[in-house]
Image: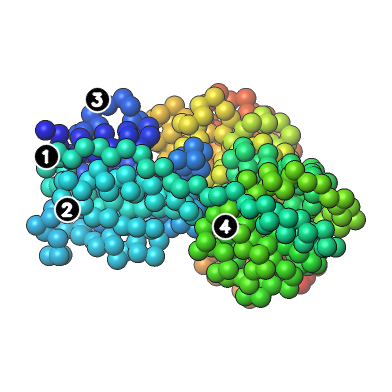
Amino acid sequence: MARCADRLVECLRAQGVDRLFCVPGESYLALLDALHGDNSIALVTCRQEGGAGLMALADAKLTDRPGVVAVSRGPGATNASIAIHSAEQDAVPLVVLVGQVARHERGRGAFQEVDYGQTFADMAKAVWEVHEAAQLPEVVARAFHLAQQSTAGPVVIALPEDLLQDDCAAPVVPLLPPAKAPPPPDAAVRQILERLAGAERPLLIAGGLLERAAGRRALAAAAEALQIPVALSFKRQEIFDNASPLFAGHLGFKIPRRQVELLAEADLILAIGVRLGDVTTQGYRLPRAPVPDQPLIHVHPDSAVLGRLHRTDLALIADPVATLQALAAHALPGWPQWAERLHREARLLYGYEPRRFADGVDFGAVVQPLARLAPRDAILTTDAGNFSSWVHSLWPFDGTQTMLGAVGGAMGLGVPGAIAACLRHPGRTVLAFVGDGGLMMTGNELATGIALGAAPKIFVSNNGGYGTIRLHQERSFPGRPVGTALSNPDFARWAEAFGARGIVVARPEEAEPAVEAALAEPGPVLVDVRSSMEAVSIYTTIAKLRGEE
């Protein structure tokens, strides 16, 4: 008879799992033993559970299937909490397998004992602790189902170490496909079209549920048929052609106030496939919560999302892709002057010329040639930080590229995400954009990548500080920074110690040669860009924040 550990591996295979990220721990030794000699599930051994979880998160974004990570009890699980929280914020399916103390030790304050139901109650969609061998196959199947159902998210399965050694006679439970949202009723489609036809300045806000190819095609087709301006939710800028005259901007952090004010002139908002969180809505102002300044039509498959934060004139529980496809079958004359105003403001920085600063390089001096020279199908990963404002503003997203970022704003995704992308798509160029703060959080996963033959191209904005926090400090308390300065190692030499090539950009004229060298390098590369803190964002400077210019 199979052990629970062996049955668990069979259950994972039945759910389509082909890759498991982990940091090994003694609390799930039997599961590791069950994977010995198994070639159907690739085991990716990482250097820290946060990095392992973020790799699984990125893998889920790339595959549209639940990412899977296994961690040990206590410290292992709490290290992985950054990925669990990020999966909830980003609406990404993630299954976390956590080793637990033996069943007879539960409740005794045993070594590294944690009650995961309490710890992850407000992050995970569900937490199961399996106490009977017969429960295991059902719990695994339910976990994968729930992770993908309605609004996707993380689930946690706690596995007592002694349970994994028990015999398990229960058969594997096959895949339980998540329920599909219905297509929109014809009457609802007619109502949307009637409201659009009566508007003078409508705006379509498109979200992450349109990320896949079918969603992107439907979005492009509907925008073209209706001639409606399209604004993209936070970290979803890549799903629509930014050169289209209908592109109305990316609703990210700290976009220019004048752009937000212009978008707020909309007299009708059609939100499709987006949860309308605080970043996308620019602090619950677009649309305003709880009562919007304009009529709101919200289309989402999860009823719990609709009407939760905003009064909604039409709340439609429907498949966002099918809704756009239905709308694309109709034509409207459009609003050319309104669309042109929005597009002009959204593209304001496309003629950007990198500036010169005494304290370092404008990060745009690197992003601009990289955007021009990188392969069109390159995969981009962005860590959290103001440096990504150059990527969002200067990259020529045409609706086909893949970009991985943390909607929840967690630092640390850049390097692990790039490693996961290299492993999933070994033939494609993978570019990671990361700050010096985020790099030192999870950059150690470069060792994991190099051990497995990954070859990411990592571009570090090294401005010697936590730039985003510094911007907030200068905005709220001008001239009084505290706690945000960093003392960094030589990142190029640090990368070389791992086995990657290290390149330094200390002057603007070194930027393009460094980009060319990085793209030509067959192996992993880290480009240490000695960037300017004065140029704290593409949108502003320290001097401007202090009112000095």
Query: Distance from label 3 to label 1 (Cα)?
Result: 20 Å
Report the side of 132 relative to 39 (left or right).
left
In percent of width and height, residue 252 lies at 66, 57
Q: Is residue 111 above or below residue 56?
A: below
Helix, strand, or loop for circle 2? loop
Circle 1 crowding by C-alpha within 10 Å: few under 14, some 14–19, many from 20: some
Residue 324 in view (yes/no)? yes
Query: Which quadrant would the N terminus be assigned to in this image?
Result: top left
What element does badge 4 sit on? strand
Image position, residue 185 (x, y; %): 63, 53
- Label 1: which residue? 167
Q: Are marks 1 and 4 in contact (CB under 8 Å)?
A: no
Residue drawn at the location 39% of the way across and 58% of the way down:
125
Which label is found at residue 317?
A: 4
- The answer to whether residue 255 is left or right of residue 111 is right
- Are the residues tagged 3 and 2 within 8 Å (C-beta)? no
Left or right: residue 44 versus residue 152 is left
Q: CA distance from mark 4 to mark 3?
A: 46 Å
